[in-house]
Image: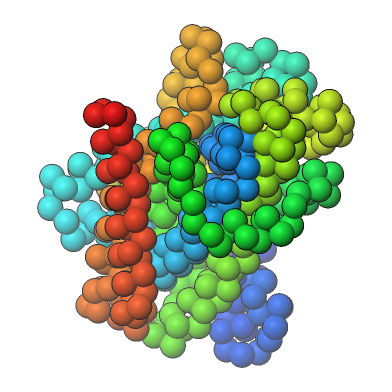
Amino acid sequence: MSQTDSVTVQRAQAAESRTVSAARDAINGKVKGIRALLPFLGPAFIASIAYVDPGNFATNIQSGASFGYKMLWVIVLANLMAMLLQNMSAKLGIATGRSLPEVCRDHMPKWMTYGMWVVSELAAMATDLAEFLGATLALNLLAGIPMLYATIIVGIVTYLILMLEKFGFRPLEKFIAAFAVLIGLCYLVETVISKPNLSLIAYHSVTPWLGNKESIILAVGVIGATVMPHAIYLHSSLTQNRIVPRNDMEKIKIQKFSTKEIMIAMTLAGFVNLAMMYMAASVFNTTGNSHIADLTTAYHTLTPLLGSAAASVFLISLLASGVSSSVVGTMAGQVIMQGFVGFTIPLWIRRLVTMLPTFIIVAMGVDPTRTLVISQVVLSIVLPCPIIALIYFTQKKELMGVLTNKRITTILSTIFAIVILGLNCWLIVQTFFG
């Protein structure tokens, strides 16, 4: 390590130490209000990026273009699911000092652990495929860079961002949080430009509706794109050693701060998802462009309808989403492998391997948006595995101690799992038996 790197690492460690010290002051009641919450901001914002990845762009825009405002309620439902599940995941890390994959390895039979690892790795691959494709497509449309070269650039950029991890948890948290805020600002601009119908947004956000087979497939895709398996695994890892509780009282206080952070981060992610869909409903569905079925067409259609500025903002948000969520996806992949089977591979190898499916898709000329939607359906089918494991472990008193789930939490999370399983079963039946 060079002298410059050594100094940088020392500064990062000092900043991390200051964060932990500030968190201790908040836990002990020496600091109040927003200043008390600041040291705890980070893990939920990293996890929330998974909820606004390019897969969300694909499913939300198709849903809004095809069915207008009618499917907004799916996003609201999915976001409520996400808040509860991410809170449970964060709580598991705080209570046990272990990630969800590690807890599975500790308490499940080996055959089951390896089975969950394989399924989870498939989910991680589907996630990386969506994220890489989205960022590659955005770079291609924004800068005119050929898709294959854009894939290489995205891979290099995400690898460099991941290198921030060696400087402690704080630099990477700040970087990812900045991306989350950027995506939110982009869709705030899109909301102003697209002028959606606010009364229809309010009505359809709380009124369930399901139409034909296509709407069900998109609903499952929206849930798969919103409630992410790898984010559930990752969040427990992000909280397990960040601010280590020294007693039960500290566990309770840290969990309360974590819950507040999750509500802030997931509300931002929920707004972005709603904005994606109601922008598509306002711009495409109501103007006779309900045929919009891919991101490229959406971009080219936005230009004459709303102007080049709106189209460029759309691509900037897609690029920020793809790059940041690809970083988070790689982090989750490491947590999944290390947790379930106890070993890791060098970061550059994982980054290279996860790029290969995208290279193949691009080289074959497969429709990127259709691939994105299919990847989200795959994620929704895999999703019950981490949810069921999370529900099972967080209700065990001997494991969770003072942070054991309340009965209502277990009931609600079980209902969410049943809803997801029901939608998935319907999708499988319709897909294979018509």
- The quarter of the picture where the C terminus appears is top left
Q: Residue 242, position in %: x, y?
A: 50, 65
What percent of the width, then of the height, locates residue 82?
47, 59
| Side of 325 relative to 346 (left or right) | right
> As rendered, which of 268 and 91 lies closer to the eye?
268
Q: Residue furthest bottom?
A: 29
Q: Residue at x 45, y 20 (%)?
A: 356
The image shows residue 169, relative to residue 361, as above or below, that is below
Asked whether the viewer can see residue 128, the reply is: yes
Q: Is residue 295 visible?
A: no
Tell me if 129 is positioned left or right of 286 in this view. left
Picture coordinates of residue 177, whole percent (x, y): 66, 54
Residue at coordinates 57% horizontally, 89% vertically from top-left? 28
As displayed, is residue 239 above or below residue 184?
Answer: below
Q: How many marks?
A: 0
Q: Nearer the viewer, residue 424 or 399?
A: 424
Q: Quadrant of residue 114?
A: top left
Nearest to the observer: residue 57 or residue 117: 57
View extreme (top): residue: 364
Q: Quadrant of residue 5 in the image?
A: top right
**Image coords of residue 185 (percent x, y):** 77, 50
- For the N terminus, the quadrant is top right
Q: Residue drawn 33% across and 38% down?
A: 427
* Residue at the spot 34% in from the left edge and 56% down from the top edge: 419
